Amino acid sequence: MKKLVIGILAHVDAGKTTLSEGMLYLSGKIRKLGRVDNKDSYLDTYELERQRGITIFSKQAIFEVDDTQITLLDTPGHVDFSAETERTLQVLDYAVLVVSGADGVQGHTKTLWRLLEMYNIPVFIFINKMDQNGTDKDKLLREIKERMSNRCVEFEQINTTAFFEEIAMCDEELMDTYLETGHIDTALIKKAIKKRKIYPCLFGSALKLEGVERLLHTVVEYTDEPSYPAEFGAKIFKISRDSQGNRLTHLKVTGGKLKVKDILSGDSWKEKIDQIRIYSGEKFKTVNEIEAGGVCAVTGLSNSRPGEGLGIEKASNKPVLEPVLSYRIILPDGMDPRAMLPKLRQIEEEEPELHIVWDERLQEIKVQVMGEVQTEILQSVIKNRFGVDVAFGEGKIVYKETIANAVEGVGHFEPLRHYAEVHLLLEPGEPGSGLQFDTICSEDLLSRNWQRLILTHLKEKEHKGVLTGSAITDMKITLVSGKASNKHTEGGDFREATYRAVRQGLKEAESILLEPVYAFQLELPKKMVGRAMSDIENMHGTYKISQTDGETVVLTGTAPVITMRNYQKEVAAYTGGLGRLFCSLKGYEPCHNAEEVIESIGYDSERDMENPTGSVFCAHGAGFLVDWYEVKNYMHLPSYFQDKTESEDEVVKHRTQKEEMNISPEEVDEILKRTSYANQRDKEKIKQKPKRESYSGPINRVSIKKENKEEYLLVDGYNIIHAWPELKDLADENMDGARMKLIETLSNYQGYRKCQIIVVFDAYRVERHVEEAIDFNNIHIIYTREAQTADQYIERFSHNNKKKYSITVATSDALEQLIVRGAGCSLLSANELKAEIEKTDRRIRQEYRQINDENRNYLKDTLPSKTKREMEEMINKGRGVK
């Protein structure tokens, strides 16, 4: 038997529920037709739906027609519940779009059409209410072709010449077939419908069961059953609770089979299925397994989310339709809002578009919704489920923010024994594109695991803009660089650095405030057009006359939600009830009164302690705060934009050598001097650090301090090996050889410098390794114990002996340089140490040559005169000189 999942969609009051009842009745699923106005329809099972006569939650019914089993998913028609409809679209094979013959293509009908196109769902169109006076079939079909698609084809008189000619116009393949044979097979038409090249249109009256049976048989005849892979996959589209409070996860199996007691796993959970339910209306039956193509509800999952993919199925994209109004929830006197918050989170779990928001500063709960009708439903749900009477404050517009230019955001988090730095490229996106995330960071610079963690942190939070604290959107955020510490970095460090990088970038960018905008269709008497045009202009909207029919004019256009949200009442008033306004959310556009909104909200981004714009750096063993405008003067990695100006060779070299950035002692001193100002907000007290011409430029050589104290040189062994090209090349083949060559080089150097040299090598990954000290000729070699790095050993030695000895540390680890310099020790970078050793080698060779020359001259000069003459004669004779 062929199995299909079909959704039924419509603008409110188009007759969608009545059509569903007719389909169930004619298929034999129900024996009596239910009516919305009689409050006894099969699918509107919730008391609220029956009271209001509208569909609020999507439901399913299963029935059979001929040899086809149809799972029908009924969706809400009211615009306030369109997010519920959008979630249901994710699991449909085909859709039936209901258009009111009395009203034509309305605003929300167009929204549904765009969603069906976005999710690539084949569509059958049923034009309902054709029994009402004034309906014109030809006029309606022309309107549908003009406002939706010219591939909408009437499927009333099929297998006629006119029918085949119209079908052939929709696709070149069909046209070629028709020209060759004068006929088009059903199989080709089915294929074209599935590829959305044809949209069958049928007319009728659901209330009188006219055209409904034809619709059913057309759907059965012109659809193909989807094919599914053998490997398990499923898509979650809804969360609900039954009358006993059991949590239900509604899903469609898109591959393999699902069985009771199977263990499913999502992004961050792994749980076992207790029960599989097949619902039809209010009733359900339990089964032990369900095959691909089936829709069911399962119990046992406590962390699943709508839109989540299981098995081979990928997660859905973020819904297009978003709430545009925000309301404060007013609780009864004496009720703790923190106690109510978890209960509201339970409702949010079922209706994710609600966006329950906790305002820590005001200690109040806010909810974001699509419209006022949704607040009334939410109020009833809270009362019925939790017995709490809530009220709502005045609705406010949900604004968003984006940026106009590309910037690099830098976040650094380095309190004591923590470390992470993140560089993000923030770029403006296309309107309506939402947030997109990517990484182009080299894995040589930052491992894949850390990169994935940063992307997770970018996606897990709603990042606030800096103008009004509204959510950011229409932006691409790319990870371009980052740094971790082998010994100090933890997962939470990158969360902090990532959040701060976003905010720091937003502070530097040119931000734009966005507001929600309606696309509207206004039908009104011709004599009222002037008034309407004036109103729309005053509402900062745009319009055009799209249709004129006798005494009726249709205006279409866009206007801000805030100016048009109550305009329906005015239209009804000045037209005497003859005018009709249909609105649907178009999206977000630049705010028409941005300065006024920003001033009224009064958001201070630098006082938002939950979303800091600055970063945390470390010196003298303690973290200190750096304001957003100073972060790039302290950051440890080069700027992405600066890196882009390097030659290709320099870029390749920088990305492959894994070299640490060098910080000169002068720069470190400057950082440390500013530590005393770190917690002050006075910008003038924070001294500007001179910017370096290049992060890869020449290095100021630092000499070992000449003091009376005994001198110690501590060398970070592996850091130096990876920094010197000749040792790094050798290490790639033989690390022991590279280590021995470094030791011998330092031994020669010590013989000339006469200081105490300690070379420290990491052995912290060697299980149960104890600290090991070895003397090689004239230097000391340390292999650290398990769980101790060379940096830690050097830090400890420097701290314990800085008063006793004159200590210099050789390393190119920027973090280590900062800590050691803060302890009062001298520094040598890897390059500086190399230069010192090469200089010493040259000096040794020069002195050796001088000694040899002096020795040879001394021997010759001490010979007797007679002996010297005899030697010269012998030499000349040997050369043939007379």
Image (cartoon, grey):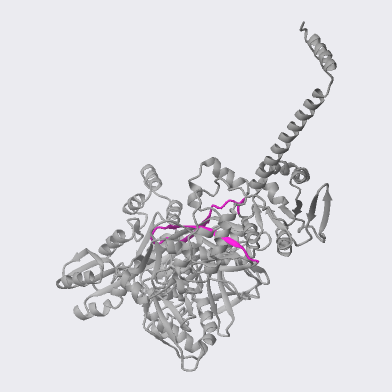
x and y, in percent, of residue 649 in the image: 55, 40
Image label count: 0
The answer to whether residue 304 is seen in the rendering is yes
Left or right: residue 64 compared with residue 489: left
In front here: 506 or 63? Answer: 506
* Above-or-below relation of 398 to 143: below
The answer to whether residue 294 is seen in the rendering is no
Left or right: residue 212 compared with residue 140: right
In front here: 331 or 229? Answer: 331
Which residues make up the magenta segment? 417-445
In front here: 346 or 62? Answer: 346
Image quadrant occupied by the N terminus:
bottom right
Left or right: residue 108 compared with residue 736: left
* Residue found 31% across the figure and 53% down from its top: 162
Q: Which residue is farthest front?
A: 865
x and y, in percent, of residue 398 in the image: 39, 73
Q: Which residue is farthest bottom?
A: 334
**Residue 759 included in the magenta stretch of the image:** no
Q: Which residue is farthest top?
A: 882
Image quadrant occupied by the C terminus:
top right
Hey, which quadrant is residue 604 in on the image?
A: bottom left
* Above-or-below relation of 806 to 728: below
x and y, in percent, of residue 525 in the image: 18, 73
x and y, in percent, of residue 262 in the image: 67, 69
**Residue 437 included in the magenta stretch of the image:** yes
In front here: 704 or 331? Answer: 704
